[in-house]
């Protein structure tokens, strides 16, 4: 092959529609968000952990679950990052993704952090701390999906759990 | 009774952001031909093939079909052929698959091949996002970078690791990659340069993150009897294993530690009768796709106490001339054809044991460790290779 040889590139793209069954548990969880602005987890009958997101069986005990437990609108931030670059087809930056352990739950819910200025890459990470208290901010128009909680924001006046 | 198994041949391809000079099967052919040449074997000497790729990174589903002939003509020869895919651990699972084929006594000489053309997707994070729960979590745009950035921010919070520590890991790996003709990133990087790089997902900068690479790797596993006839420098499998963690990472938010890897290391060290890995291992090829992971992996693998991983780098313990060199190849940080990368880690470990690692060779290697992670930090594979028969 010589340096001058032209190598052609064939274009490709996938745009395949799917539909994902939310199931009974996520459906009830989302209905509670939409209709009552309440966040529910489920309790394993064996290990007694309150699991979030709710699921029909405990993966540790392999026990079926049918007990629903309301958890708090507030919780503790356990994990975070702030993404500053745009990725094709993904939400625009800056976006702070967090895991929050809601009061009364044993696991964390994945969501985003709002209510603070993320624009300055040097300052924003100083505003977000593992262990800080956060609370759900609800959308007025709720559709029965995880986005019915618009975001979590820092709880004023008590920065620590 | 499990049979002893050795690696008798390794084939790597040059990796880059887009191997425009080859078609997909030509890329795989390049790795397979190199492995056959390394073992001085012919295609007809192979009894079975285990192939790995992480669909749908290349925009083609079930790549084993496209590549079946590039794997020693397995299709035309009507050979037994198995495809494995376990996310980022695909290459590690592929190696385990080859090992199991031979140790079980079912086959004597088995070719393992793994390949990926991440360079053929225009947005790797968007592909990775399809691996995330579509009911609760995908909407946030998570991909590998954001998941791993959580590991970094937690390690900073709990152990005081800094951006400069990450930059030192980057500089070390970039320097090593300059000795590796197969590595993707081939440029000098100083700690100061790294600290000026663009922030991708706090606290990970561009130099803390692996590139998207095209590349392939092939490794030939052989039974004890056949290995002795094939090569004078076999790399014996002394320990190996895989571990899986639960699906919802919100149930295990202690990202500063990697307890799945610690548990697997304990199992594999026990099998290999290793008590002090820092002293008894001569080199480690870790799946350090991101700088912070090399730090956490060193801790989880017992090279140091939890939280002390950055000290290993600062003291030069894991440099080329250190007590336990980590990633003489430049690691995953400098080369990441995802599904192939795990097999490359094990292949690099094997080359060190065989004494064939050229400019990146660590002197007098007897025992080497290969590590692979994947599945949104939920899976790990380890393989310990040794000059001596176990």
Image: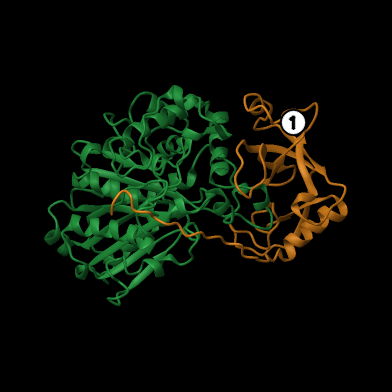
Specify whether A24 is left or right of B170.
Answer: right
The chain letter corresponding to green is B
Q: Is residue B288 visible?
A: yes
Asked whether residue B99 is in view, the answer is no
Residue at the extreme bottom of the image, as rendered: B78
User: Regarding mark 1 in the picture, which secondary structure is present there?
Assistant: loop
Q: Residue at x 37, y 35 (%)?
A: B303
- The coloring applied to the image is by chain
Graded by Cα atoms within 10 Å as few (under 14), some (14 to 19) or many (20 or more), the crowding at tag 1 reads: few
Describe residue B300's horizontal placement relative to residue B3 as left or right.
Answer: right
Q: Quadrant of the N terminus of chain B?
A: bottom left
Residue A14 location, x and y as percent?
57, 62
Q: Is residue B390 left or right of residue B306?
A: left
Return the residue nearer the eye: B41 or B259.
Answer: B41
**Residue at screen point 25% across, 60% down:** B221
Q: Tell me residue A50's x, y (percent).
A: 70, 51
Q: Colour of chain A?
A: orange
Is B67 drawn above or below residue B248 in the view shown? Answer: below
The image position of residue B227, as x and y in percent, is: 17, 60
Q: Is residue B388 left or right of residue B29?
A: left
Instruction: Write down the residue under mark 1.
Output: A116
């Amino acid at each position: 092959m010589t340096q001058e040889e032209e190598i052609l590139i064939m274009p490709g793209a996938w745009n395949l529609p799917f539909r994902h069954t939310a199931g009974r548990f996520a459906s009830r969880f989302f209905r509670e968000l939409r209709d009552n602005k309440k966040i529910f987890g489920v309790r394993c009958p064996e290990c007694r952990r309150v699991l979030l997101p709710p699921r029909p069986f405990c993966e540790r005990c392999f026990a079926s679950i049918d007990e629903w437990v309301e958890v708090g609108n507030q919780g503790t931030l356990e994990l975070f990052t702030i993404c500053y670059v745009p990725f094709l087809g993904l939400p625009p930056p800056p976006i702070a993704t967090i895991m929050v352990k809601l009061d009364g739950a044993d696991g964390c819910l994945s969501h985003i952090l709002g209510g603070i200025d993320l624009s300055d890459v040097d300052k924003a990470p100083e505003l977000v701390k593992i262990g800080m208290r956060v609370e759900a901010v609800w959308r007025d128009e709720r559709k029965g999906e995880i986005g019915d909680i618009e975001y979590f924001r820092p709880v004023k006046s008590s920065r620590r759990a | 009774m499990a049979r002893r198994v050795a690696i008798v041949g390794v084939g790597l391809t040059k990796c880059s952001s887009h191997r425009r000079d080859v078609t997909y099967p030509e890329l795989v052919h390049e790795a397979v031909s190199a492995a056959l040449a390394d073992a001085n074997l012919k295609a007809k000497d192979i009894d079975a093939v285990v192939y790995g790729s992480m669909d749908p990174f290349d925009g083609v589903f079930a790549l084993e079909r496209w590549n079946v002939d590039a794997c020693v003509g397995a299709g035309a020869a009507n050979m037994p052929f198995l495809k494995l895919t376990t996310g980022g651990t695909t290459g590690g699972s592929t190696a385990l698959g080859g090992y199991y084929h031979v140790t079980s006594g079912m086959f004597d000489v088995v070719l393992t091949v793994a390949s990926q053309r991440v360079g053929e997707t225009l947005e790797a994070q968007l592909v990775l996002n399809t691996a995330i729960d579509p009911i609760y979590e995908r909407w946030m745009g998570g991909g590998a970078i954001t998941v791993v950035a959580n590991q970094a921010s937690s390690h900073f919070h709990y152990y005081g690791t800094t951006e400069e520590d990450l930059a030192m890991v980057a500089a070390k790996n970039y320097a090593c990659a300059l000795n590796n003709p197969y590595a993707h990133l081939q440029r000098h990087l100083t700690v100061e340069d790294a600290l000026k790089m663009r922030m991708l997902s706090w606290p990970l900068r561009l130099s803390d993150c692996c590139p998207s690479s095209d590349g392939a790797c092939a490794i030939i596993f052989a039974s004890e009897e056949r290995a002795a006839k094939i090569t004078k420098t076999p790399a014996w499998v002394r320990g190996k294993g895989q571990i899986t963690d639960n699906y919802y990472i919100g149930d295990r938010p202690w990202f500063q530690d990697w307890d799945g890897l610690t548990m697997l290391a304990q199992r594999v060290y026990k099998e290999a009768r290793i008590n002090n890995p820092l002293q008894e291992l001569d080199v480690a090829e870790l799946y350090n796709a991101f700088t912070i992971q090399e730090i956490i992996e060193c801790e989880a693998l017992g090279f140091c106490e939890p939280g002390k991983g950055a000290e290993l780098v600062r003291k030069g313990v894991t440099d080329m001339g250190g007590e336990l060199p980590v990633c003489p190849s430049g690691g995953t940080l400098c080369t990441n054809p995802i599904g192939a990368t795990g097999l490359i880690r094990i292949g690099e470990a094997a080359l060190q044991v065989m004494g064939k690692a050229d400019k990146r060779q660590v002197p007098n290697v007897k025992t080497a460790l290969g590590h692979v992670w994947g599945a949104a930090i939920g899976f790990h594979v380890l393989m310990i290779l040794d000059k001596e028969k176990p």
